[in-house]
Amino acid sequence: MSSSIDGVKIGLEIHCQLTSLNTKMFCNCSADYRGKPPNTLLCTVCAGLPGSLPVLNKRALEAAIKIGLAINCKISNKSNFFRKNYFYPDSPKNYQITQYDKAGGIAIANEGYVETNLGGVRITRIQMEEDPGKLQYEGSITTSSNTLIDYNRAGISLVEIVTEPDLVSPKHAREFLNTIQSIVEAIGECDSKLDGSMRADANVSISNGRRVEVKNISSFKEVERALNFEITRQKTIQAASKMETRHWDDVRRVTVTLRVKEDEEGYRYFPDPDLPPMDISNDYIEQLKNLLPELPEKRFIRFTNDIKLPGEIARILIKNKVVADYFEESLKYENNPKLISSWITTDIMGYLNRNNINFIDLSIDAKSLATLAKSVSDSQINEYTAKSILLKSISSNDHIDDLLKSEISNSVTFENLLEIIEKVLNDNSKAVADVKNDPQAIHFLIGQVMKATHGRADHSKVKELIEKQLK
Amino acid sequence: MSNLLDEFEGIKEKNKSINAYITFSQLDDSISDGKLSGKTIAVKDTISTAGLRTTCASKMLENYVPPYDAHAVSLIKKHGAIIMGKANCDEFAMGSSTEHSAFGPTHNPHDLERVPGGSSGGSAAAIAGGLADLALGSDTGGSIRCPASFCGIVGLKPTYGLVSRYGLIAYGNSLEQIGPMAKNVYDCALLLECISDYDNRDATCVNTKRIDYTSHLEDDISGLKIAVPKEFFGPGTDSIVEKSVWNTIKKLESEGAIIEEINIESIKYSLAAYYIIAMSEASSNLARFDGLRYGLHSGKSKDWNELFSNNRKFGFGFEVKRRIILGTFSLSSGYFDEYYIKAQKVRSLITNDFKKVFSKFDVIVGPTMPTLAFKLGEKLTDPLSMYMSDIDTVSANLAGIPSISIPCGNSNSLPIGIQLMSSHFNEKTILNLGNRVEQIAGV
């Protein structure tokens, strides 16, 4: 574990929506609430109508256990739901069904551990809970004159991952969040690209200060920003003197006081009588363990040890399951990991990032990329040409196979190349003579040949042929 | 006009003096087939009925019309019962007299000056007053059995988990069940048969084999072992009640039942534990009534906090507010261990003590209520004495066991009820014994 020089301690609570589920956590309403007209995905249960009762979606339990296993948690054999009581208009029942770690409460998973580039982080627990509805403000929360409520999100399944205060800097927090993101993506239970599917609250303190909670951070980029602001704020006032909850206002980019925090005391947690305790057998846990796909950290080790990729390249690939899968798919057709990984991490991802395109929307399929790499291995074209085909294809949507075909038909044949070399050597007798004294002078000759072939010839092949001629 | 619609008009007329119903159904004269075909039924107003106003006897839900039927309601419809209307009760089932209703008290048909018991007082009075053949009640701490006793009818609280709570507007949801109320044990068994169908919409509903209760009513009772806990005859028990219950017990003994007096000491903590748990749960269950989505809306406020407060201030009656405040208190940090957790420990103790008794006995017998029906207003200003009247009924809710109240005598034309309890899912045994009680008591 890392330690911080300025005494910064950060703990995170990460809410991951289980976006892989078709229905909500305690009813049969569709969980696909994004882009739907407000208050249309509601039933007696998630609208909290009198007399309605929650019944646990078994898939939610399954997904929570899988996430728990993936971050090295102990899965509980008995677990139960509690009610967190608070009056707030986003909650149709004025209580939230959640889990608790005191008063006989047992969360679904406890005591995990996640490794990151900037140091390991202990996981306190994972708890299952329901998402509340969504309050919509006009502009900033502090200045909006009215509030609209959409309950479509109410009852969506969440897991909350709670960490120990092991994070030592905003950057560490960001790195950790990216790691968690890649893990839940790899398991396939949370699609973090969906708006609001992963949210975080942070606890921050500096040396000798009280703990301040920052809520309402809507994206991971914002987490780093909000933490930087809050740490600077606390340093300026020389450490917080009271425990409080502050709200991240992402329009004004400041944290603002919401209320002096009552801690857990105001919530009157007690076991929800409507949901009997869950019994989770070791067999069931084992069964889910076998269903887990290869996790990013394991894949990293395989990429660096077996495929021999440099660490920094492997790190980029494993961060996004779609990218890593694409890479491995390409390797099936052409086993040239060095070239393919370099194209993916620099040329392809560079282009996509500049143009704000998701990797999943990439127009080049893995097989075509492999074909391109194969034509380099077979010396049909050189790397330079291949790269220009790649960039042309990605930006124009022209198919790689077509571009490659026309390139090869225009390319320099072996006989052609010999003729060109002979002409260059004849035309540059001085340079030919220089090579005898200075072997570096050969590069001038190679350059002339490349120029004459418009860069289409294979550089090393040209060198080899010139050396042969000059012997 | 058909007989049914004639009868319906007569019932509406009679209801004026008894006030058993808050809302009447829109009836046509069609009659469906089924086990309950043609039987008229009153449904307690804490149980949701699609398209039929369900108020919980509260101003808060004065205009609330549920979009769905409780599972028990779908079942009685399926079996051909005719729902006459929604029966009066204490507001949100909180009370033992049906005086805490925003729609006025129900009167006991045996003596209109007296309470029918509660909280399912409208259901019991409807049957006793001839305003319905059957009724659905709900019982959190005695709310079916108390009015059954005071009104001289049969009422059964099922094992926790036998009848789906889906659609029952919750008061104390770890304690309560919807249950059958009827003129006699046979009808009570028949109605239980119809409503005790497994429902996967209630996670606390237990998927056990359901039984034809009516076919076991005449089983032989000789050799049945009956325990009589002394604690059920505590200091507040009327001597006439004690005498009547013991008379019945003696008659059962002469029919071959084996009687033994026992002690269950934990019973003396039951009332305190019951009220803490029920009120704690109620404080959370009733939080959803904020008037934002449905229910009483008190008008424009400066923010949601004030809006919620006003809606709840005007929507809830005094007893409901008292219980919400007490429940909130006992769940609050600093008091939680002292009250809620301790009450749960008592609950486990009582459950285990009853289990021990049932390892040796088939049935536990005692009075349902320590007194006869009291006068309207008599206990209204003395909540503790009102709470005390639940002393003999709450144990069954804490332990989750079935319990039935059956008329066993009268005093000055006021009915007396005897209470029979058995182990979990053993409704068959108390209905069987209850049927015998009915025959020998001859009330």
Image (cartoon, coloured by chain):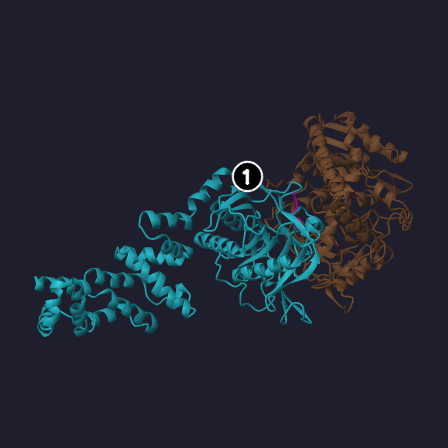
Chain colours: A cyan, B brown
The C terminus of chain A sits in image quarter: bottom left
Q: Position of residue B400 (x, y in %)?
A: 70, 39
**Can residue B139 be spotted in the picture?**
no
Q: Is residue B8 left or right of residue B236?
A: left
Task: Please name the predominant secondary structure of the magenta segment in the image.
Answer: loop
Q: Position of residue B337 (x, y in %)?
A: 73, 40
Provide the residue span drawn in magenta.
Answer: B161-165
- A20 vs B366, left or right, is left
Measured as percent of width and height from the top left, residue B87 is found at 77, 54
**Figure check: A322 above or below A110:** below
Q: Locate residue B229, reporting x and y percent.
A: 79, 29
The one of A231 and A145 positioned closer to us in this rendering: A231
Residue B258, placed above or below residue B127: above
Q: On what subunit does the disc labeled 1 rest?
A: A
Front-most of residues B326 and A368: A368
Residue at the far front: name it.
A437
Q: How many marks?
A: 1
For the residue pair A182 and A270, the one nearer the viewer reads as A182
Asked which secondary structure carries label 1, the reply is loop
Disc 1 crowd, CA 10 A, few/some/many (<14, 14-19, 20+): some
Q: Identify the residue at horizontal 46%, vertical 44% (top origin).
A: A288
Name the residue carrying label 1: A77
Q: Quadrant of residue A452?
A: bottom left
Q: What amino acid is found at the position of numbered circle 1 in the picture?
A: Asn
Name the image quarter holding residue A238: bottom right
